[in-house]
Amino acid sequence: MLRPEEAQRPYTVTELANEIRRELRPLTALLVKGEVSGMKRGTAGHFNFSIQDGVSRLDSVLFADEARRVTTLPEDGQVFIFRGRIDFFGKTGRLSFIVDQVEFDDVGKLRARLEELKRRLEAEGAFAPGRKRRLPFLPRAVALLTSPTGAVIHDLQETIWERYPNMGIVVYPVQVQGAAAPASVARALRRCNEEGLADVIVVARGGGSFEEMYGFNSEVVARAILASRLPVVTALGHTSDRTIADLVADAECRTPTEAGARVVPKKSDLVALLRERGRRLDREAGQRIAREVERLMLKRQRILLLLPTLVRVRSERLARAAADLGRLSPVQQVARREDALRERSRRLTAAAMSRLARGRTTLAGRRAAERLERALAKRFDVATSTLNHRRQQLSAFSPESVLARGYSITQDAETGAVLRSSADTAVKRRLRIRLATGHLGARVEEVEQ
């Protein structure tokens, strides 16, 4: 039986749970050091895990709001210092440590992990200058991956628009600190490449401690920069250490202002450069035109000086050609043949007459003289007939007869050469065409082989 002092109303489970919570209320802002185990992310963005020291284990939870603010997200096997409070959940009957801040317990170990990642990336050639993409001279637009609030985005926009007032800017808001920063930056990089609204990307934040900048030392950010089709410029503020993001980026700047000046040229400088190049082009064009005019004038003077000689040479050549043509003319050849035939006939007649005179004294001589006269007359008739026949043949094939039948002789107007093939002339060459009566001047419009 219960003693009287023990006779009291029993607690309900909920009342006892509330009592326990009231008793635990002073246990706030506690610091707990331990190794992470069983890290799991819930559907609402909360993280459930255990903190252990080899002897005891404490169930813990990191709610989504705090997870977005912490510097880095703990992983299994890592030792951290957690700040939080103890709470009791009546529905599950579990005592949990509610974490609101995570700090590295051993920065040395963290740096060792970072150096190991650097060695792996360097072995892959991720830091090699030859791999890095060239920044565009004048981009269509600049993509800014940074926090949508604060001085960083203001400095970037002000610098870019001061240098190039109508430059396009596309802002991709990202988390630049906390456990969610690496995934946020990586997603924005992929989206920027997929949309293709800009030609260069600037990843920026306002600096910070080693722990605050740790998100830009993550492999997920490094891989996203390496996979980017567009060149990436980092502007992570004044820090003592270069982050892995800086090492794999195509260009690294210390401040957002420096990054803005790096990716966009000064419009006023470009306008001045264009004007100077325009003036230089005008000068060079004027000088070239002057040189060309001088060259043409000198050429004209040489032509004028050589013109009399050229006319004389062409005249002499034409005279020789006319003489050669005269010697080769069938009419002249027939005339020379007739003269030769008449000369031979004269000599033969003279000889025959002399012989006839000597032989007239005898009857036999007279008969022989008669036969000789008949033979000479017959031979003269045959020679005359043959000569007439050849004269007709030569006349039929003479240039004048050929021209009279509708043919023509085509000569180059400058050289006087007779054209025997279309390959002997060219388009725009001047021609001289000889007809049966008169001549024609012409120009070649088309050459067909």
Image (cartoon, rainbow, N blue to C red):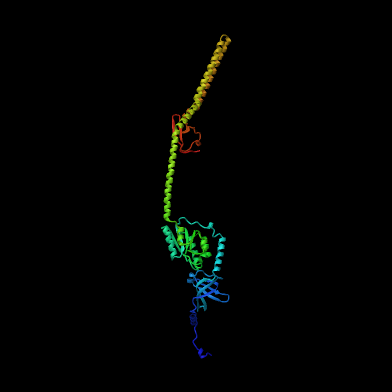
Q: Taking 303 as reference, is 369 above or below it?
A: above
Which residue is at the far front?
240
Q: Taking 217 as reference, is 434 above or below it?
A: above
Q: Taking 52 as reference, is 128 above or below it?
A: above
Residue 309 location in percent, x, y? Answer: 46, 31
Residue 205 location in percent, x, y? Answer: 47, 64
Residue 307 location in percent, x, y? Answer: 44, 33
Which residue is at the far top?
361
Q: Nearer the viewer, residue 377 or 298?
A: 298
**Residue in the image at 48% along x and 71% along y:** 66
- Is residue 171 visible in this depiction of the protein? yes
Q: How many circles with numbers are drawn on the protein?
A: 0
**Residue in the image at 50% along x and 90% along y:** 5
**Residue in the image at 43% along x and 45% along y:** 285
Q: Nearer the viewer, residue 309 or 45?
A: 309
Q: Nearer the viewer, residue 209 or 5?
A: 209
Residue 249 location in percent, x, y? Answer: 51, 60
- Is residue 398 visible in this depiction of the protein? no
Q: Taking 258 as reference, is 308 above or below it?
A: above
